[in-house]
Image (tube, coloured by chain):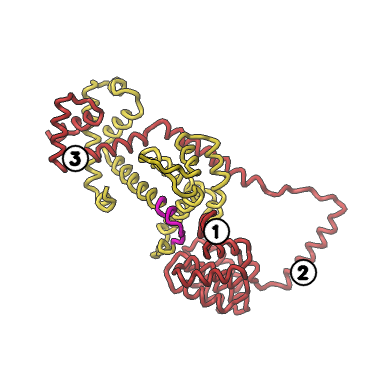
Amino acid sequence: MDTKPNHPDQLYIEGLITNNSSVIESIYKKFVPKVKSYIHANSGDDDQAQDVIQEVLMVIYDQAKTKGLKLSCPFDAYFFLLCKRRWLNELKKSSSKGVTFLDDEVSLNESVRETVFQTEIFDEKQSLFDEMFQKLGEKCQEIIKLSFVTKTMEEVAEKLNVTYGYVRKKKSICTGQLTEMIQQSAKYQTLKL
Amino acid sequence: MEQDIYLTIENYLNDELSAAEKTAFENQLSVDKILKDKVALYKETNQFLGNRFSKDRAQFLENIKAVSKASFAQKEETKPKVIPLQSRYYWLVAASIAIVMGIFVFDSDPTFEEYYQSENAYFNERGSVETDLVQAENYFNQKKYTEALPYFEKVILQKKSAEIDYFYGLSLLETNQLSKATSVFKTIQQGNSLYKNKAIWNLALIQLKEGNFENCKSLLKEIPEDDENYEKVQKLLNELE
């Protein structure tokens, strides 16, 4: 039972998961300029800044929707640190030399660091799921997608012109296959899912 | 068959097993750890997939893209308006240009001021405890470099970080303590952090400021071509040749 009161900035998380336009616009107005400046000062342009920001907002949304996300620190700090680290990671990938900047992480606030860490772990997990999903056969991908997009399995069966029993079975087999691929991947071991 | 188990798992998670089947399955789970883990992963996978392909998520993504587009486009529109000049002032403009050109002709060497760009530090979130680092950051971003220095000096005794060192170096540079700034940047140059090339760049600018063009050039040549700021480096090198 969660008896701790919510951090006032929890409203930003709520706003994101309910697709509240005024909250989203408020985030862009209040918190995005600082991220934009940082990226510009570190060899990035507008397009790259836009991408980083969108990707981070999507991860926050996904984490909040899938696992739940309770802020215990200001959204400002959390959001900025996520964007900053994501950008530095991008730079690291395109740089040919080994960069040790992650040791330079200076944020002193334990709560921010912890929340950022949780989100980054979630992001890695999700990337693994996405990666393995892409490796599934086309038929499996299609049936899984349809089963989540369409209201009932009966409708899915109709769309694919097969029986209800068949789609249910096939969907479960495909999902099972996906879990096997995830379990067997090296990343799964390191993430200790 | 091995694959049959997944349909059972799916039914179990959807609460579509009969009471008897459910009990049997739960008994199995209590003794079979591998199966238990499989079920947990299957459940988690369904959670991920459910969100991934939800209409809500697709709509959210659309919305983000739209707000983002508008937000970034807005910034570009706030360029200063160009006000047409009245014709009687054209002579003023012509004279000013002539003077500037004259200065330009006499001042052909590149200068420190032309190439040095101040930046902002972002160590900490706003609203956090008033630690030394927060003070340093605030003073630095307000361009109060003299006030920032003692705070930087306190922090670097406690924390080893190329990022902090870099901004400490900039503070020294801004307050014209060039030899101290040089030794700080040199330390970063010897490391392997993200600030390495930036440190070399500032070392080069210090040499430029002191009129040591040869030293400046050899430092600039240490910056690799794939560095994102290489355009500036190339430009300065060209001017110095």
CA neighbours of label 3 inside 10 A, class few (<14), some (14 to 19), many (20+): some
**Magenta residue check for A113:** yes
Residue topped by disc 2: B102
Badge 2 vs badge 1, beta-carbon distance below 8 Å: no
Is residue A42 something one can see in this rendering?
no
Chain ID at mark 2: B
The part of the image, by quadrant, that contains residue B70 is: top right
Q: What element carries label 2?
A: helix
Q: Which amino acid does label 2 sit on?
A: Gly
- How far is mark 1 from mark 3, CA to CA? 50 Å
| Point 46% across, 33% down: residue | B59
Single out the mark in the foreground, 2 or 1: 1
Numbered label attached to residue A127: none
- How far is mark 2 from mark 3, CA to CA? 83 Å
CA neighbours of label 1 inside 10 A, class few (<14), some (14 to 19), many (20+): some
The chain drawn red is chain what? Answer: B
Earlier-in-chain disc, 2 versus 3: 3
Residues at marks 2 and 3 on the same chain: yes
Single out the mark in the foreground, 2 or 3: 3
| Point 77% across, 48% down: residue | B83
Q: Chain A is drawn in which colour?
A: yellow
Query: With respect to residue A118, does B157 lie above or below?
Result: below
Residue topped by disc 1: A41
Query: With respect to residue A169, does A75 lie above or below?
Result: below
Q: What element carries label 1?
A: helix
For the magenta stretch, what is the residue range? A105-115
Chain ID at mark 1: A
Numbered label attached to residue B36: 3
Residue A169 position within the rendered picture, expressed as x and y whole percent measured from the top left: 21, 28
Q: Nearer the viewer, residue B183 or B73?
A: B183
